[in-house]
Structures are given as C-alpha cells and as structure tokens.
Amino acid sequence: MLSFFSRNAAKTLSPQEVKELLDSDAIHLIDVREAHEWNEGHIPGAVHRPLSNLNAWGGDLPTDKPVVFYCLSGGRSGQVLSWCKSSGHAAEGHLGGGISAWRMQGLPITRD
C-alpha cells in the first residue's frame, strides 16, 4: 500500500486510492474543512482538523503511518500539505478533488 507514496514528493491521490488505503488502515485521513462542512458529512474514518486552526494542530500529526489530507475540492488540503512539507512535518498526500470527487464516485459519507 505504501507504494502510493514517494519519499521525496507529496502525492495527489484519487478517491479510489484513498478508499483502498483507508480500508487497509494504511493512512491517517485528516479533513481540513471547517466545522459546518464537517457536520454536513465527511469521509468515514477521517479526523477533523480545520485549516483555520492549523497553528494549534499543525505540529501535532500522527507519525505511525502516512497522513493524507482532504477538503472540499483539493485547494485547502494542498495548502496544508505544502505547509507540512516546508515545515518538516510528516504528510504524504491529499485527496485530489476533495470530498467532491469522493462523492462523485459514490463513496460513503457519514455524519457521526
């Protein structure tokens, strides 16, 4: 599973790749959208860490497996990923197209 990732470059992952990695418990998936977006629905297994609170949680990322971010369409998750890479924090990729692409593929959403 970790073959999706390169040691030198962040990866933009498809919804199917993220689903496969989640199903095999090979990643930590972090939703960087705001609370109202999270409450409207999120990817099962994701952890909520809003971009607006990046300074509070940015240095506190899990290190036991790769971290992948997502947002609505890929813009904010790409920003967080760039920040992590430039700050020396462990982050491997983001969901290209965000939860919008996930939904378009008919993949599950939860409101727990």
Image: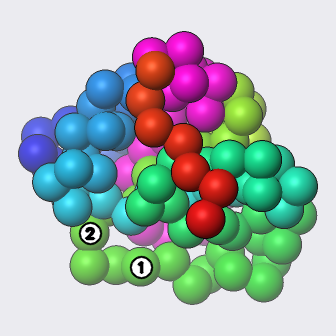
Q: Is residue 17 magenta?
A: no
Quadrant for residue 26, please give it.
bottom left
Q: Is residue 20 left or right of residue 56?
A: left
Residue ID at (69%, 80%): 57
Image quadrant in which the N terminus is located: top left
Residue at 57% over, 84% down: 60
Crowd around label 1: few <14 · some 14–19 · many ≥20 (10 Å): few
**In the drawing, what numbered circle is on residue 109?**
none
- Residue occupying image coordinates x 34% and y 39%: 18
Q: Which residue is mark 2?
A: 65
Residue 73 in picture, x, y percent from top left: 69, 27
Q: Is residue 27 visible?
A: yes
State the residue lying farthest toward the top.
Answer: 104
Residue 16, image x, y percentages: 31, 26
Dot 2 crowding, Cα within 10 Å, few <14, some 14–19, many 20+: some
Q: Which residues are magenta?
A: 81-105
Q: Which amino acid is tagged 1?
A: Pro
Task: Name the residue nearer the viewer: 88 or 105.
Answer: 105
Left or right: where does residue 42 sit relative to residue 37?
left
On residue 62, the disc is 1
Residue 80 higher or lower than 74, as above or below: below
82 or 104, which is in the foreground? 104
- Give above or below for 1 relative to 62: above
